[in-house]
Structures are given as C-alpha cells and as structure tokens.
Amino acid sequence: MIAVSAFSDFMKLAGASPQEISAVAYLPWKTRRIVKRKNMRSVNERPTSLFVVLNGWAGRYSLRQNGSRRFTGFMLPGDFCWIHAATGSDMDHSILAITECLIAELPAQLVDLTTRSSPALAKALWAAKLIEEAVLRKWLLNSDDAERATSHLLCELYTRSDKIGQVHQGTFDLPLTQADIGEALGMTAVHVNRIMQRLRRKGLIEARSGRATISDFSAISAHCRFDPTYLSPGKY
Amino acid sequence: MIAVSAFSDFMKLAGASPQEISAVAYLPWKTRRIVKRKNMRSVNERPTSLFVVLNGWAGRYSLRQNGSRRFTGFMLPGDFCWIHAATGSDMDHSILAITECLIAELPAQLVDLTTRSSPALAKALWAAKLIEEAVLRKWLLNSDDAERATSHLLCELYTRSDKIGQVHQGTFDLPLTQADIGEALGMTAVHVNRIMQRLRRKGLIEARSGRATISDFSAISAHCRFDPTYLSPGKY
DNA sequence: CGCCCTTTTGAAGAAAATCAAGGGCAGTGG
DNA sequence: CCACTGCCCTTGATTTTCTTCAAAAGGGCG
C-alpha cells in the first residue's frame, strides 16, 4: 500500500468513495527511486505502467531537431503521470526527474482492469488528464507576453505546491533553473532572467537558490490574471 | 442513427468491434446546424452533451483580458468535441463554428452510461483526448519558430483533411483567414502573411480564397519535421 | 459598381535571441 | 581551511524577429 495524501485527496475531489480510494491504495504499487536529472520515461517507449510521483519534481518534455528541449508540463508530488498507459499508444515525449524522485508504479493492465470496476478511478484519471490539458492551454494562452507567462507559471507552481502543503509563508521549493523555466515558456534563459528581475523589482516575487517566495499572492495573480480553478478537478 | 464514417473509422482504429460501433451510432444523437462564426459552446457553460462535428470546421479558443483571442485547436468533420462532457467540469474555453457546421449531440449522461457498458467507446474517447493533447504539445513545441509553426499547422490540417478524404491532388479546404492562423500560432496576421509568402516562394504551399495546396507533401514535411503519427489513435 | 473582408506592402519601433563575459555560490579535493 | 571547479545567475552590446500602425490592393458578392 502507498500513502499519498495528495493522491487520495485528488480521488476524493473527483468523487471517489473511501472504499474505492483504499482499494486503489492497496493495489500492488511498486515504488522506485529516480536519480536527479535522469529520464524516468523516454520517447517512443511502449508505456507499461502508470505512476504517481510520491516525492520530487518531474518534467515532461520533447526534443527538437536541433537538440533544444521544450518542457510541456511539470509533475509535483501526488501527480498522476503516464495516464494513458492503459491506452497502448507509444509515447511522443519523455519524462525527466528534475530533482531526485520517488515514484509508485502500477502495471497498465491493472489500471485498465481497475478502471472497469471502479468508475471513480476512471473519473479521477479523466480529471487528471483534463487538468493536464487545461495547463497546456494556459501555457499557449499566455505565451504572447513574457512577463505574464512567467508570473502565471509561478502562480501555477505556487498553487500546486500549496495544494500539497508545500508552501510556508509564501515560500516554496522551486527546483527549476532559469534555463528550465525558459524551456517551459519558450524563451532563452537570458530573457527569463531579465523578466524575473522585472517581477522582483515590482515586488511580486523573490527567488534564490531553489526556493521562491510570493509574499502577496493576490498581487501577482492580478498581474497575470491567474485564476486557479483550472487546476482543480470538476465536481460530480 | 448518424452516419459518420470518420467517426466510426476512428472507433475502429481505437479497437471497437462492429457491434459496439453500431451501438454507438444508434444512440439518440441529435443533429444541429450552427451558423458560421457563431459560438457553439461558451466558456463557463456546464457541459451537458458531447458532440461530433459532421460537417464544417470549428475552433476551440480562449479570450484574453484585452479581448484578443487564442485558438487552441481546430475540429474537422468526424472529430469528437467536448469530450469531457461526462466529467462535469465547467468549460474553460469556447468553441466557435469557423464555417457553418452540422453537429451531432449526445447527452452527457448517455455518454457516461454507454462508456460503462462499452469499453471500446471509453477507449475511443481516451484516444481522441490524447490526440487533442498531443496536438497541443506540438503547437507548444513548434512555437519557437514561426516558419516551422506555420508549415507544421498546415501539415496537421492537410493530414487531418486527408484522413477524411478531403484532399484532392494536394488541395484541401482551408477556411481559416490569416488572422485565424495568427490567433492559433500566437502571431499577428501581418506576420503570418509574410511567413506564408516565404513558404510560397519556397514552393512549399499555395493558398488562396479558402483553399490550400500542398503539391509536395514530403518537401514541407521535411521542412518542418512533421511526423503524422501523433494524429492517429494508439493500437490496442 | 460599390462594399466589405482579406491579403499585401512599407516603415518604424519593441521584444526577444544571440554572443560574450563576469560574478556568486556550493561542493570537492588537496 | 582554502583553492578549484562547475553550475547558475547576471550584465552588456548587438542583431534578428516580430509587432504595430497605416494604407493600398485584390476578390467575392449583392
């Protein structure tokens, strides 16, 4: 059994009964540790298992012809990943451990089986996928304005950290380098640096050595028109 | 009953049996006609029905604070839409009829019910959603290079048109204005115009009055590194 | 023909990439 | 304990890309 409060909180939000949640929790999850900055899944792999991040941050990315990388999402503790494992399609992207990660895996067949008997798990997986997609849309939507894109990403990560109790007095772990952020937003590290300095000068953020602080969340929310509802599963 | 070859082809690809396909086809779909350039779904709506585009093109978009629009996807005949209808989350975006559209709707509860008895439908919906997501990732991935983004979008639309038999000698309907394309790619109409001229001068495309021609698909594919596999559902 | 919408063109300015180099900080090893 | 090293952040100067603003040209349709 695995104990992931974020994970079961999510299922609860998605409408699962306590029985269903514990049924899922008691499935034969296998935990595994991934070294920092190593791939945990690679492009073109045949997906054979779903997993949940128990600890650490991971990133979903694709490589371009010229070798440059684009992040298309980040995974925090409690996040489902590789959700489509049960669908049998090959991967069109890779997953990288940004920090050292602890993950819990579940064989695809078991996911497939369990979703048939547990509509709530099926719904939870859908809900997780829809959030993933909503995040992608936001990234696209904000990509026309560097300052908005940057602060919106910080709001996203702040909110997601907060949901799992990882924000303390406005401060949270942000294990992304400015180069990583650039690869998520489609800008160069140099430009990210200058934009973040601007945000800092405006008093919206503080960031140094792997940690960020947002002392006035409503201020930065207003600045980039951040509305956190897209990060929550729908009600049923 | 509705007769949508693209739709049933898709279910077949996703592994549905003929019985399941016809079971779905005989559900009480309601067809509806939408006027060109009218919303068929609007942001914040409570989704009550899934639909399939039978005819015409539609676009998924969000509006920004300043009123500017960003397309985050296009729907062609045969495409599922509003797939998350059964999940109960509110919409974070709107759907616009780009041309006049004919759609077939199915109440959300029925979708929910049917997916329980028909794993193939459930998988088809998953497959459709995964393709949607893969498209979003591609849009992000290509957004760093205007010429690549533009030709990649044209390749996407060419391929999807081809799948439904709407390409004849390299020519297909492209009911998007350059302003629309700009709103999909995150660039101004003026810039789209200049980029498309560049593509034309390179002999990669021809486009005028609602139609586009790609006479050498392999040439433009090579130019933007287009790989169509992400547009097909996984095998089961 | 005249109107509206879309495409095209030009010129100017803003935003971001690129190139290059310096500085800080943490961990490593002598 | 201190020097060294590697990684990340920062800065400046320059060039490229894209937007903005404005206006003209084309094309379809009543």
Image (tube, coloured by chain):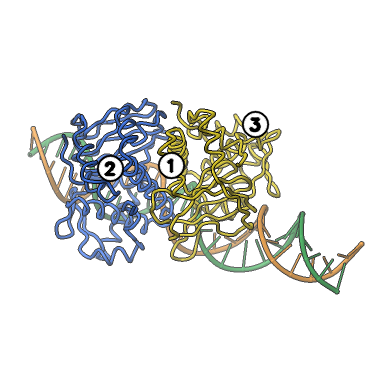
Chain colours: A yellow, B blue, C green, D orange
Place of residue C11 in the rendered image (x, y in percent of width and height, measured from the top left): 37, 53
Q: Crowding at label 1, few (<14), some or many (≥20) Cα neighbours within 10 Å?
A: many
Q: Nearer the viewer, mark 3 or mark 1?
A: 1
Place of residue B107 in the rendered image (x, y in percent of width and height, measured from the top left): 28, 27
Q: Amino acid at mark 3?
A: Asp
Marks 2 and 3 sit apart, C-alpha to C-alpha, by 40 Å
Letter of the chain that mark 3 sits on in the rendering: A
Marks 2 and 1 sit apart, C-alpha to C-alpha, by 16 Å
Q: Is residue A37 left or right of residue B13?
A: right
| Quarter of the image where one finds residue A217 | top right
Letter of the chain that mark 2 sits on in the rendering: B
Q: Amino acid at mark 1?
A: Glu
Which residue is found at the position 44% from the left and 35% from the top?
A118
Place of residue B145 in the rendered image (x, y in percent of width and height, measured from the top left): 41, 57
Q: Which residue is mark 3?
A: A216
Q: Which residue is mark 1?
A: A133
Q: Earlier in the sequence, mark 3 or mark 1?
A: 1
B65 is higher (above) or lower (below) than A55: above
Q: Is residue A124 left or right of residue A175?
A: left
Q: Which residue is mark 2?
A: B75
Q: Crowding at label 3, few (<14), some or many (≥20) Cα neighbours within 10 Å?
A: few
| Quarter of the image where one finds residue A159 | top right
Letter of the chain that mark 1 sits on in the rendering: A
- The number of numbered discs placed on residues in the rendered structure image is 3
Q: Secondary structure at mark 1?
A: helix
